[in-house]
Amino acid sequence: MNDTKKIQFRSGLKDGIPIALGYFAVSFSLGISMVASGISAVEGTVMSLTNVTSAGEFAGVKIIAVGGTLIEMVLTQFIINLRYSLMSLSLSQKLDKSVSFWKKLIIAFANTDEIFAVAMNHQKSLTLTYMLGLQSIPVLGWTAGTFLGAVASDLMPERVSVALNVMLYGMFIAIVIPVAKKSRAVLIVASIAIGLSSLFYFVPFLKQVSAGISIIICTVAAAGIGAVFFPVKEDGKETGDDKNKTESTIE
Amino acid sequence: MNIYIYILVMAAVTYLIRMIPLVLVKGKINNRFIRSFLYYVPYACLMAMTFPAVFFSTSSMLAAIAGVGVAIILALKGKGLMTVALAASITVFLVSFIPV
């Protein structure tokens, strides 16, 4: 590993720490609910290592618990996790030129909400090295948290796991606020998304819609309105492309 | 049914959803609308996931409101992700001791 790669990897590792801490708390509670649903610690650990998705796994555990069909499982996972395809689409635009087909196959594996969020907030174009650094500790934290939650259900006081869980939301806020402060368009798009998601949360009829679907609808609607009324400049100024130029020569 | 079959199906569906758009899109998209749309996706998506869910993610809403408030103030001041996330978390922890 040369120096540039070392720096990229380390910077990824550092960015992954807050994600991993938040994941640990969430997956700990996931591990607890797995055992309560009749899934063993080993099975649960394998699930977390291979899926790396919170809502999808929680839903999957419920289906396993009631002995649902595989079709049900496919549909549920598809609906809950479809938002990742939007994120991957967005992420594809920020990948460094050095990222080949095979590297994309690796990066795709742990493109979670939080990893996507931090990657998009990264000041440079995304290399495989940075992404490996960014993904490694969170995947470890997610898997280890599930295992520990499953084997030691009542070790962590609820007060602590709840507080750790809020870290993830705190991170999202820290990503959006500074950009919304500078860009009125982002502020408006973010506000529309919050307004719509509140409708899905509180309005009786809309409450029936699953969280996975409502996130997709809110995202598509708010980003769509943004794209219609505040198209980004052709020179890519708002997309931060100018900052990426120095990075694309690396490797 | 063997639980590992369920897990395999879950993992396959989730991976394909993440992988297909990433490998299908080659290079930069030139369409201005799509580029603009994708530029706004992260902000829209993150806020839709955070609000209002965050207010119901803790045992007391007061703790959640305090945590969000601290996060917003620190983020406005330009503090980093780790600082904001930890401060929100600690705030929720401390406020959760206040009986409501």
Image (cartoon, coloured by chain):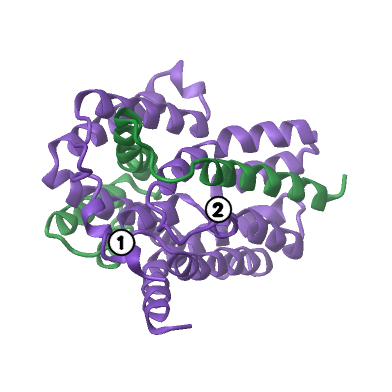
Chain colours: A purple, B green
Q: Which amino acid is tagged 1?
A: Lys
Q: Which amino acid is tagged 2?
A: Ala
Rendering coords of residue A76 (x, y %) = 65, 34
At a point 39% along the width and 28% down the height, the residue shown is A220
Q: Chain of mark 1?
A: A
Residue bearing mark 1 = A124
At a point 51% along the width and 24% down the height, the residue shown is A209
On the rendered structure, is B38 left or right of A174? right
Residue reaching furthest to the front: A249
Q: Identify the mark nearer the N-term, 2 or 1.
A: 2
On the rendered structure, is A218 left or right of A145? left
Mark 2–mark 1 distance (CA, rounded to whole Å): 18 Å
Rendering coords of residue A223 (x, y %) = 32, 31
Residue A32 appears in which quarter of the rendering?
bottom right
Residue bearing mark 2 = A108
Task: Point out which mark residue A137 bears.
Answer: none
Q: Chain of mark 2?
A: A
- Residue toward you, A194 or B64: A194
Quarter containing the C terminus of chain A: bottom left
Kind of element beneath mark 1 = loop
Q: Is residue B57 visible?
A: yes
- Residue toward you, A239 or A17: A239
